[in-house]
Image: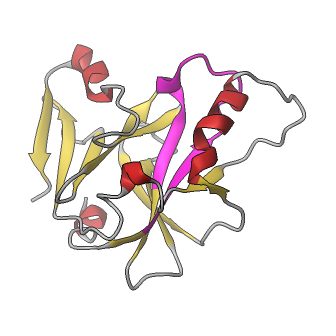
Amino acid sequence: MIEFEKLQGKKVEKLYLILWPPFGEQKISDIDVSFGFIFQNSNNELCVISVAKDELWFPHILYQSLPQNEYDGADYDQRIKMWMKAEDDNSIIDKEYYDVTKCEMFEDIISSEIIDIELLFIEHNVLPFGIKLIFNNDYIISMPNSDGNTVETKVFNKNNGIKTFKHLGNVIISKLY
């Protein structure tokens, strides 16, 4: 969890939604989506918070180069619906990056500092299943779902994802330090 400690105090300069296209998916809650951050003073790398792809359970940070191709955040909903309808069998499926920096629903995250970090646990488990980044007027939760990762903020993707883990035991939220 040391990798997450380094995020505290970082200021978000640019924000991406990173989507694995939900070709033929039935439910929005199953979509594999993560956040990618460009922090102030680190313009050459994208910090992606998702689940560890080898475990599909634990939160993980991956640093990667900036996306070569990106969509405008305003196209996100339209493209999700297109993928879910499985309209184009010939499409090349690869990660899609949506620049949501100028989207109103993320305005309380952009130019804001991560002021606290919390970990999400199932009672009696020593490793967390999710992470919550806290800003002054918003938050981001990143946690696993059936296809990979899902995210939630105070207004985006409100699927009550944490509740889906309650059948495994009590959900414990703990400060990172």
Can you tell which quarter of the image residue 83 is in?
A: top right
Residue sitting at 72 percent across and 21 percent down? 85
127 sits left or right of 142 in the view: left
Farthest residue, direction bottom: 41
Instruction: Give coordinates of residue 68: x percent, y percent.
Output: 71, 68
**151 in relation to 3, above or below:** above
Total count of labels = 0
Instruction: Give coordinates of residue 32: x percent, y percent.
Output: 54, 37
Residue sitting at 90 percent across and 34 percent down? 90
In the rendered view of the protein, which quadrant contains the C terminus?
Answer: bottom left
25 sits left or right of 93 in the view: left
Instruction: Give coordinates of residue 8: x percent, y percent.
Output: 21, 68
**54 in relation to 172, above or below:** below
Residue 146 can be seen in this image: no
- Front residue of 130/39: it is 39
- Front residue of 58/97: it is 97
Residue sitting at 31 percent across and 65 percent down? 3
**70 in relation to 146, above or below:** below
The residue range painted magenta reads 14-35
| Residue 15 is a magenta residue | yes
Can you tell which quarter of the image residue 70 is in?
A: bottom right
**162 in relation to 74, above or below:** above
In the rendered view of the protein, which quadrant contains the N terminus?
Answer: bottom left
